[in-house]
Amino acid sequence: MNAELYQYTLPLRHPLTQKGKTITERTGLLLKLIDEDGAVGWGDAAPLPGFSRETLEQCIDSFFGFAESIRNREYFEVFQERAHLSSENKEVLPSVSFAIESALQAILGHEDEFNTSASSIELSALLSGDAESILKKARTLRERKIRCAKLKVGRGEVQDEAGLVVSVSKILGTECLLRLDANRAWSLEEAKIFAKAISGISIEYIEEPLRNPDELDSFHATTGMPYALDETLYEMPPPTMAKEVLNILLGERRALWFNAAAWVWKPTLLHVPMLGPALQGLVQDEFGPKLVISAAFESGVGIAALVKYAASCMDSDVAAGLDTYAWLEEDVLLSPLPLSGGHADVPAICTLAGQIDMSRLEPIPMPPGCHGGIR
């Protein structure tokens, strides 16, 4: 097996500010794997500034080590040993692990260990921006009969935010599930005020309403509002295998995890081989939270891999959060992914994901003295 590595930089439609960092373009790496029969698979490693532990430079170094380790090996040997090969006794970088597994799964196609029998998945639309823009988009979503939408809250006064939720809910109606995401904006008391102000509004859940997640049980018990975990997932110690993640979820904070309505999983930020099926099995066995696959502003290659993850790991009635793709002004694919209709055609997305616009990519050569698979 051989590998090639490329870097891309894609402009965003609007500046993106998160955790005090503002970016106007998205930079990442594409890994291309070629097996002994010439089959090709692509993977996307795009650390998100302000959220990812790893830097782009660390990802490049990790890919060099992986490329060296797969030289002259056959596909299935690499697939079976990928956890060891991607770490080599070092910390597993989530975005690198995600890219490697995505590329290997793309080569394997439909005969893989993920059950990708779902031909279509539901998608959640993202509502963000100023109030006028949000209300305008909400009306558009209703006209298009979109069945799930997520509204960002926690950026203004609590009462103003609650009023916006009420207005959006009235526009969307009962046919569209409404999710909220506060990104840990509030104290427990502020969150209680917010919950009271929107009482009577039906929501699927609110992501991370509290600055202190250990108070979520109290918030839920007091308000009855279902919560979802997002940032809390990525604060666990960096795992090297899926079993370590499961041990944490089943550990001393088990009540926090399993009282949640959903776990919002972004593989770019938390990934080890086979984590998806492990999480899927855990929530099914425990009759606990929903697993919601979510994006972190990846390129079309990464988003397509997430579509496949969603088709294999999520319940069919749960919508994946992949609307960050709409922030990209340009993409690494020859044709943009059709994701605006509230659902994704899985086979069509997988086909488009293999059609790369090579003019958007800058090759990254192997360093002098290294004779690995990247060429």
Image (cartoon, rainbow, N blue to C red):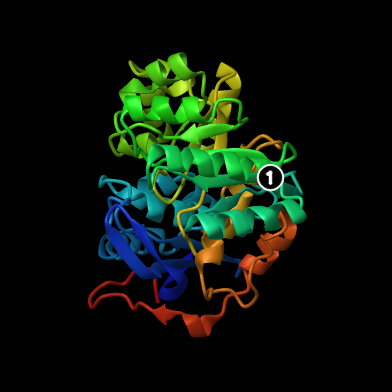
Residue 105 seen in the figure: no
Q: What x and y, as percent, mark residue 40? A: 58, 67
> Is the residue 167 above or below the residue 31 in the image?
above
**Residue 147 pos. (x, y %):** 71, 44
Q: Nearer the viewer, residue 367 or 126?
A: 126
Give the farthest residue toward the left: 369
Name the amino acid, label 1. Leu
- Residue for point 49% across, 29% down: 197
Left or right? Give the position of 367 relative to 309: left
Instruction: Give the residue displayed 51% in from the left and 40% down from the top.
Output: 163
Indicate whether 27 appears above or below 103.
Answer: below
Residue 273 picture location, percent across and down: 46, 43
The image quadrant where one finds the C terminus is bottom left
Q: Quadrant of residue 219?
A: top left
Neighbour class for label 1 at 10 Å: few (<14), some, many (≥20)? many
Q: Which residue is mark 1?
A: 172
The residue tagged with tag 1: helix, strand or loop?
helix
Residue at 55% x, 21% y is: 288
333 or 373: which is nearer to us? 333
